[in-house]
Image: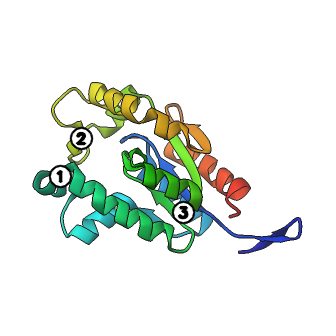
Amino acid sequence: MRGARRGRTVSRRHVILVGLPGSGKTTVGRLAAAALGAPFVDLDEAVERRAGASVAAIFRDGGEGAFRALETWCGEEALSSAPSVIATGGGFLEDPANAEAARAGGLLVYLAVSPRIAAVRLEGASVRPLLEGGEGAERIAELLRRREAAYLAAEQVVTTDEMSAAEVAAAVVSLARGLAHW
């Protein structure tokens, strides 16, 4: 839908969710996309389709570099498509080119979560290659230290610790309507 604002045409922008594993990017993204009537893209799922292998298998066989290259490719494809809600991988913004493309292509929303809550949410979840080899909350805290500056460059922050997925999705929908022209 296009609307006029001060005599110019305004187009919808992508809504791009970033944050740690366990922040709710995929769950919230699906809910927000449904509420907006928007397409939903999960970059991890797009990578798996493109590779014909799971994220864990890509990490095992090609390492993190192979995964990040596919993630960048899938991110570029998503950002060049019709406006949608996009759930990125937790490390998507670590690549400066990805971060720049995301900022240029849409509304970046950081779903902030404490490492302790993220670890609880991820208990029993499928394999997360970057979280192997240590206590969950400690590994997530380490990822947060490495990625927080990139996450905080997002236009908006929604703190998810005390909110249900539906409440976070409602906040994202409100941001999408107010700032991304949905």
Which callout, 1 or 3, points at the residue further toward the start of the chain?
Answer: 3
Compared across the picture, whether 107 is left or right of 143 comes to: right
Q: Label 1: which residue?
A: 59
Under mark 3, the amino acid is: Ala
Point out residue 80 in the picture as x, y percentages from the top left corner. 50, 72
Q: Label 3: which residue?
A: 33
Q: Nearer the viewer, residue 46 or 147?
A: 147
Can residue 61 be seen at all in this image of the molecule? yes
Under mark 2, the amino acid is: Leu
Q: Are marks 1 and 2 in contact (CB under 8 Å)?
A: yes
In the rendering, which numbered label is found on residue 129? none
Given this view, does label 1 or label 3 mark the residue nearer the observer? 1
Q: Label 2: which residue?
A: 130
Mark 1 and mark 3: Cα distance apart in space: 29 Å
Q: Secondary structure at mark 1?
A: helix
Point out residue 161 in the picture as x, y percentages from the top left corner. 49, 32
Q: Secondary structure at mark 3?
A: helix
Can residue 27 be seen at all in this image of the molecule? no
How many C-alpha atoms fall within 10 Å of the one at disc 1: few (<14), some, or many (≥20)? some
Mark 2 and mark 3: Cα distance apart in space: 27 Å
What is the residue that sits farthest to the right in this orientation? 6
Mark 1 and mark 2: Cα distance apart in space: 9 Å
Which callout, 2 or 3, points at the residue further toward the start of the chain?
Answer: 3
